[in-house]
């Protein structure tokens, strides 16, 4: 499933278990990301709460950097954020107004790294709208829905489009 849509990504978040380290599937995802040209990766070391020894987490971090290097991503430069997605989610379920929760803040830190490390691509918004349709679905009660990648331009609600091809 990972390869679906990967060719159009400007960056990716690679989630690795802090308790287990890189697994075979991690390496497969990095290989696919490299092959389809995903230019930037940010790493989230998940399950930090399950690692009692900070040195173990550092070893996993080093292993992740070595794995990134092996697939020609700059392991030393790639941001690595540690946290626990489960504990962040549980904190938000308990209190949606969480602003001072350690685990939620780590998710915010992850997104800050994504924003700073993965550059916002230049989009040709001043040109005529063009979207390459990748799939079409028929949804009962709604009609036909097309999905794809906007190559250029902007589309606003209620605008008419021509379907060519």
Image (cartoon, rainbow, N blue to C red):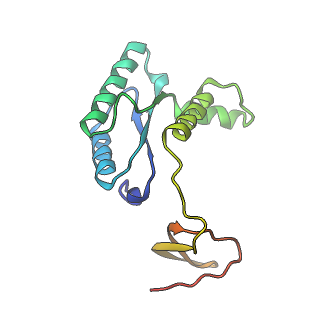
Q: Quadrant of the N terminus?
A: bottom left
- Residue at image position (44%, 54%) is 9
* Relative horizontal placement of residue 97, taking residue 70 as reference (left or right): right
Q: Which residue is outermost to the right?
A: 97
- Residue 5, quarter of picture: bottom left
Mark yes or no: residue 122 visible.
yes
Position of residue 54 measured from the top left corner of the image (x, y, whole percent)? 43, 14
Q: Quadrant of the C terminus?
A: bottom left
Position of residue 45 measured from the top left corner of the image (x, y, whole percent)? 44, 30
Mark yes or no: residue 53 visible.
no
* Relative horizontal placement of residue 73, taking residue 78 as reference (left or right): left
- Residue 145, quarter of picture: bottom right
- Residue at image position (59%, 27%) is 103
- Residue at image position (71%, 29%) is 99
Q: Would you place residue 161 above or below residue 88 in this image?
A: below
Position of residue 121 measured from the top left corner of the image (x, y, whole percent)? 51, 52
Q: Would you place residue 124 above or below residue 112 in this image?
A: below
Residue in front for this viewpoint, 153 or 31:
153
Position of residue 137 measured from the top left corner of the image (x, y, whole percent)? 50, 75
* Relative horizontal placement of residue 65, taking residue 123 as reference (left or right): left
Q: Which residue is outermost to the front?
A: 126
């Amino acid at each position: 499933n990972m390869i679906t849509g990967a060719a159009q990504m400007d960056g990716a978040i690679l989630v690795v278990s802090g308790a287990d380290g890189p697994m075979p599937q991690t390496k497969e995802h990095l290989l696919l990301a490299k092959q389809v040209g995903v230019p930037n990766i940010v790493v989230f070391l998940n399950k930090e709460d399950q690692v009692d020894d900070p040195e173990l987490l550092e070893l996993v971090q080093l292993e992740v950097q070595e794995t990134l290097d092996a697939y020609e991503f700059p392991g030393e430069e790639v941001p690595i954020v540690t946290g626990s997605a489960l504990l962040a989610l549980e904190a938000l379920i308990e209190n949606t107004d969480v602003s001072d929760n350690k685990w939620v803040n780590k998710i915010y830190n992850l997104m800050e790294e994504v924003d700073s490390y993965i550059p916002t691509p230049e989009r040709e918004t001043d040109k005529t709208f063009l979207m390459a349709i990748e799939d079409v679905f028929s949804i009962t009660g709604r009609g036909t829905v097309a999905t794809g990648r906007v190559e250029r331009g902007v589309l606003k609600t209620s605008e008419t489009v021509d379907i060519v091809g």
